[in-house]
Image: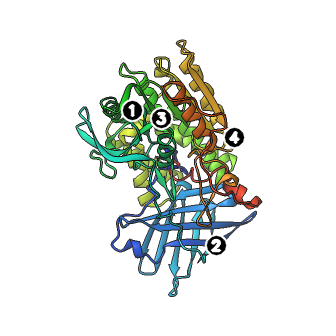
Amino acid sequence: MRIFLRHFQLLGLLLLVAVGATAGPKPGAADSPLGGQWRGSLKVPSGAWEMVITIVPLSNGTLYATLDVPKQKISRMPVKIELKGSDVTMRIEEAASKFVGKLAADGKRISGTWTQPALTGPLVLERTTGTVINAATFKPALPYREEEVVVPNKVAKLRLTGTLTMPQGKGPFPAVVLISDSGPQDRNVAVDNYRMFHILADYLTRRGVAVLRYDDRGVGKSTGNYKQATTADLVSDAQAAMGFLRAHYKINKTQVGMVGHGEGANVALLAAADRNAPDYVVSLAGYGLSGPEVLKRQQVEIMRLIGANTQQVTSALQLHEQMLGIIRQTPNNDLARAKVAAMLRMSNADIDFTMVQARAYQLTSPWYRYFIDFDPQTKLNQVKCPVLALNGAADLLVAANKNLPTLQKGLKASGNRRVQIHKLTGVNHWFQSSATDWPLVNGQVQPTFSPKALALIHGWVAQHSTLPPAAPDAKAPVLAKPKLKAASKSTGGVATQDKRAAR
């Protein structure tokens, strides 16, 4: 998935549909009897799949849950959970799947039935001995200054709250704005124990770059309504953040760039096509294909991962095209939702009603209506500033082989020679390197930002600012590497990228 995401975090149809990764607020969720990791074996015609459900009670009273199926290379797929008494319902809407079971009196087992397209079978989930992994609470003194700031967006009449990290010294410093992928995300882009933007901000600030990262509109301490926002609206947020940095007395206003991830990369590129452009851009998993093409490719990839056959994929794509036509031709949302819901029920009579309603609303959201007509190529030739584009070869959401060449072609169409692209081997959508390269933290394998990607990003900022150039062997600080067996390879290329596979 924010993988999906987040995410992602782009909508697919039929088997790939955007859902929230948390259940609604529940009093006492922090003490939920479901917190922890659950494992079980699901019998399938080809053998058996190990199913791993991780449930984390969050401090805000919600439950965050994900599904891992190593044999299918599915990792961190969002799960919605309901607990009523001892009755447990888990919905994995990206895979059109559901698990209904009963929690044992001792809290160690959930017995029930797993249902997905063309398969229904018993499943027993047992709590593993380990508890939910929490990030280390020890915080050493930072070699830079960190403060919470409020960024006014006068155009949208809202306030973005974020964190500004500033290197030690008098300055003025080069600076970057971090822009998140699609879906409402906090300033750290937190997915489990992996905080993508926190890691990136820390790395850059330790090396002399000021960094501003912010909660998306309507998230955390930021005001506004994310559900009503389109990609174009998010550009104004990024521009407001850039303006905030350029007005700061410790920032070199001629060396302010944007680093965007996923949709955030395209937000940065749209801003770069504007008159008030950033001084440079770093695109992380940005897409060069049109919105509909991105959705189509994501849907195909996810359906293949969950075991769909060729006929199922073809049928889903046909439904996808029909729904796009309905949405484009029906500006009235109520009418469009009714038509979309009817099509979904016709395609699958057993589909859950609440799932149908959720899909219909998501497919007619302002963001989705904007995205199905979005083509980055119409603006890329207007980008004049330096652009570094990085995509991971293991990214299942934004395929590097398809998107990097189209990004490069569009950016260079008007003669921009300051464009570099890199496809990073073993790196997924969340810019995590292969699991074999992850460090140990408190005895647990901890996902980390690709050291090569970090070095490339810092090098690009240094090249287009007054920073000293990056050392040839610049790497992210890592702890001792564990020697993982082959089993770890099942998630090494996917990691948490399915957190928000759809918006």
Mark identifier at residue 171: 1
According to the picture, the residue beneath numbered tag 3 turns out to be 259
Between the C-alphas of marks 2 and 3, the distance is 40 Å
- The amino acid marked with disc number 4 is Thr
Residue 485, picture quadrant: bottom right
- The amino acid marked with disc number 2 is Gly
Q: Earlier in the sequence, mark 4 or mark 2?
A: 2
Q: Are marks 2 and 3 in contact (CB under 8 Å)?
A: no
Q: Earlier in the sequence, mark 2 or mark 1?
A: 2
Between the C-alphas of marks 2 and 1, the distance is 55 Å
> Which residue lies most toward the top here?
415
Between the C-alphas of marks 1 and 4, the distance is 36 Å
Between the C-alphas of marks 4 and 2, the distance is 32 Å
Mark identifier at residue 425: 4
Characterize the local packing of mark 4: few (<14), some (14-19) or many (20 or more) Cα atoms within 10 angstroms. Answer: some
Between the C-alphas of marks 4 and 3, the distance is 20 Å
